[in-house]
Image: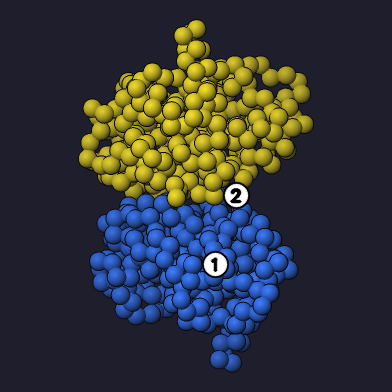
Chain colours: A yellow, B blue
Amino acid sequence: MKNYQDQYAKAQKLDNNQLRKLIRSEKFKGQTSGLSKNFLQTNLIILDKNYALDFMIFCQRNPKSCPLVGVTNVGDPFFRTLGKNIDVRSDVPSYNIYKNGELFKLTNNISDLWSEKLIAFAIGCSFTFEHSLIQNGFKIDHIESNKIVPMYKSNIKNKVSGPFKNTMVVSMRIFKKSQVNEVINICQSFHWAHGKPVHVGDPSKIGINEINNPDWGDKPRLLLEDEVNVFWACGVTPQNAILNSDIPFCISHTPGHMLITDIKEDAETPILQ
Amino acid sequence: MKNYQDQYAKAQKLDNNQLRKLIRSEKFKGQTSGLSKNFLQTNLIILDKNYALDFMIFCQRNPKSCPLVGVTNVGDPFFRTLGKNIDVRSDVPSYNIYKNGELFKLTNNISDLWSEKLIAFAIGCSFTFEHSLIQNGFKIDHIESNKIVPMYKSNIKNKVSGPFKNTMVVSMRIFKKSQVNEVINICQSFHWAHGKPVHVGDPSKIGINEINNPDWGDKPRLLLEDEVNVFWACGVTPQNAILNSDIPFCISHTPGHMLITDIKEDAETPILQ
């Protein structure tokens, strides 16, 4: 753990290009929250081209959880509109490999799995609005404690496209009740990054019965009396759509371990000019 | 012309559902600028499913001109996420039919051309920010004179996806130089509707040499000394990408004659809940 903290402290000093090189060399395999500030980080989904159209339509119909910010050409492992030399085979610290709708294994490089039939999708990420919240003076628990945000399967149904259905995954952060309106105002302009929260308050209202037992990420701390749970649509939603589906093969990032791009967080579009 | 003005005056009094019914019955075939205020209007592209993935990637890579707000399922002529009972075969006042990369003919109903192989895409439209500009006290020439906004082929290159390339189509509106900053501020939040202008000033800087000779829409009035040409990315860009391409068949709206949805202009996402 000491070794990881040292790695994270070193990674915090790097710019987006340096950090991506470190990840590519497998010298940094950790979560990327709080790193490469000012640059867009993304969720990743890699699929066989036969599922690509259904998946793009799924993203279009579920824009709160799946704001699509980049797509490779079929067979091309580079996100050419998101930066220079962004290689999806090596530039994410940790990948989840799904087979037949189940999580099969984790790995740090997928070069041996890449093929001419695959296509990669980058989806906006909560780190963007978190960074803005921090700049506006808010403290965010999981960043303060260097943990991964808690994520839950909600009962909010996704709009269906082909084999992609299931429910929305949400991430949760704790704020003072008195600050929720300000939090909403700050987040609503980040339409590539989940925008406004989807729910504030009682977790059971969106089907979450065990707030201390997240489906992904780390357990949250206890809520104080003047505080409230605030839930955002989460880019892990496509992974939930793939779980228990009949999709034979899919690669994603491991939740919390994101792709770092060359796109500024305040750019008008997520397209490299 | 008198008859058309009467029709337009009548259409102005209708809500979005009533207006769509009137269009479906072919009793209104005109341009839709200034109609069904408060509801999102869209550009339309209908393609063979074999081009659908390349086209969706084209839209993702060119978000200023092609903000995708709706996609049908393959073979399904209804935009189910944009409203109740929106039939792409009949609910647009005028359609352009393209064959082999050239404009073949105009029609008011495409039921005889629809097939199980087709898929329809709805793309955000400038009427959304125009409506906001009007609400903020601005006058827009082509609306005042009941004409169609002038549109031009620029020299701004599109990001390529498959057969879709060519250059951005831009629409032009005239504003006082002193008001341009306010115009930009109003428009920038409409990310489904082309957002901020792409160019202000000298048309030749973006490859437009004859401002009085637009490629689509009506000729603009002369510029006064304290005024300036302001250019926005335009949803006719995919039609320009299809012109001179090798795409054998495509249907679009006729520029200015848009699809009217049930989505409020100020909705957070263009998805019917």
**Relative to the observer, which residue lies in front, B160 or A154?**
B160
Residue at figure coordinates x 66%, y 16% from the top left: A222
Q: Are circles 2 and 1 on residues that touch, CB within 8 Å?
A: no
Secondary structure under tag 1 reads strand
Q: Is residue A119 visible?
A: yes
Q: Amino acid at mark 2?
A: Glu
The answer to whether residue B151 is above or below residue A257 is below
Q: Which residue is mark 1?
A: B231
Q: Residue furthest bottom?
A: B2
Q: Which residue is mark 2?
A: B268
Mark closest to the chain's N terminus, 2 or 1: 1
The reply, left or right, for residue B98 in relation to residue A31 is: left
Rendering coords of residue A111 (x, y %): 26, 29
Secondary structure under tag 2 reads loop
The answer to whether residue B7 is above or below residue A232 is below
The answer to whether residue A40 is above or below residue A226 is below
> Based on the displayed image, in which of its 4 quarters is residue A96 positioned?
top left
Q: Is residue B14 visible?
A: no
